[in-house]
Amino acid sequence: MKKLSVYFALQVKRALRYFPFVLAIMLLICLALGIALGAIASVEADDERHGKVRIGIVGDTDESFLGFGLAAIQSLDSSRYAMELVEMTEEQARRTLADGSLAAYLILPEGFVSSVVKGDIKPITYVTTGSGVDMASLFKEEILSAISRMLVESQKGVYGLEEVMRANGVWVSGSLDRMASEYFSLILSRNAVFETKVIGVSDGLSFPAYMLCGFSVLMILLGGLPCCSLLIRRDLSLPRLMNARGRGGFYQVVGEYAPYFLMMLTVFSLLFMLAFSLLAAEMPALAPSGGWHLDLILRLLPTVLALTAMQFLLYELSTGLVGGVLAQLLTAVAMGYVSGCMYPIGFFPDTIRALSAVLPSGLARVCLSTLYSGEDVTWTAIALVGYAVLFLLLSVGVRRYRIARA
């Protein structure tokens, strides 16, 4: 045990010499993947923003009740997810409608609220291009028509009842105000009659969150590239000498792999803590739930353990620097693609998804995805640890075979 600790200490010193270089290379890869993720999130945000139906509002909106109503629709009503109301002048609305940025615009007549109070509602002018009559445009008109009917008819009923009650001397102060308030509450709470369920693109995650986890696994897969000089062994003189003195393949593999694993765990913990924090600050949708720092470390442990053990095995199988680097690169690209690290796995055929579910890279992606989905990670972590043990045992077998053949 004492000699094992000495060998381990020597390997730690070797790893520390490579640590700044590995950290710098992985930082560059992290920046490249971060830029790609930022572009993906930006495109999705643009698609979401432009996917809303933009309706222009033309007219005097300074009247208190009208201003309150527009503010309520834009901030409280469920229609805000599908429709955006934009206040502008008629000239601006006409120009914006012409270039396709608006679906339509509404012209509010002067004294609109006053006429509503009196029960004599002045009509609102609805202006559209009339081109492109398809399902989308019909759906937009139906939404506007339904909202208009609900608001107009309810207001007519409330204020018409008020006139009747006043004429017959049965006026009750405040009763109609409460009735009008209830009408507005019913109209503005239409989302209470349905439940929205967002299943995400894969693993129950949004596209940016999924790609963040996928890129993180891809980055770990690529982490073996800058470690080629640390792990490639061209000369087996030292392993043969150690084996002759009773320190065989298991002793050597454990002494070499443990420092490598600790170095890579430190590198990825530092980079992912920084990257996740910056992304959460810039894009709140990518912010994990509270206390995520410890959760991230707990998920990185089995993930880095399995993938670095696989990288160690690949270098053990390689007899030269070029072969080792190519093996790492091709394996990272192939496993990253098949495991859904470059594109959502939900869009792949069933056979690819089934293969991804048993690959260590696929399990690693699922493990990191639970940081956002909140699903149980226990069995996934156990499977990753099992893969790590398997890869290390295979590495021991390869080392013993190479020593015997040398």
Image (spheres, rainbow, N blue to C red):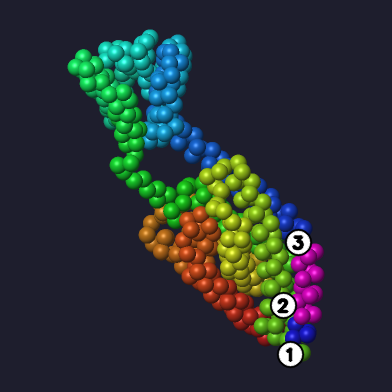
Classify 331 as above or below 91: below
| Distance from Cα at disc 3 to Cα at disc 2 | 17 Å
Classify 97 as above or below 374: above
| Distance from Cα at disc 1 to Cα at disc 2 | 14 Å
Give the secondary structure at mark 2.
Answer: helix
Find residue 372 and report its horizontal and vertical position in percent. 51, 54
Q: Are marks 1 and 3 in contact (CB under 8 Å)?
A: no
Residue neighbourhood size for the residue with mark 2, other residues' Cα within 10 Å, grouped as few (<14), some (14–19), many (≥20): many
Q: Amino acid at mark 3?
A: Phe
Q: Would residue 265 be found to the left or right of residue 351 on screen? A: right
Does residue 268 show up?
Answer: yes
Q: Earlier in the sequence, mark 1 or mark 2?
A: 1
The range drawn in magenta is: 5-19
Q: Which mark is residue 19?
A: 3
Find residue 13 and report its horizontal and vertical position in percent. 80, 70
Residue at the disc numbered 2: 255
Rendering quarter of residue 109: top left
Residue neighbourhood size for the residue with mark 1, other residues' Cα within 10 Å, grouped as few (<14), some (14–19), many (≥20): few
Viewer-nearest of discs 1 and 2: 2
Q: Would residue 217 be found to the left or right of residue 96 on screen? A: right
**Marker count (numbered):** 3
Residue at 78% in and 65% down:
16
Q: Amino acid at mark 1?
A: Gly
Does residue 52 show up?
Answer: no
Farthest left residue in view: 168
Residue at the disc numbered 1: 246
Find residue 199 and report its horizontal and vertical position in percent. 40, 51
**Along the line of sight, which residue is nearer the eye, 382 or 186?**
186
Give the secondary structure at mark 1.
Answer: loop
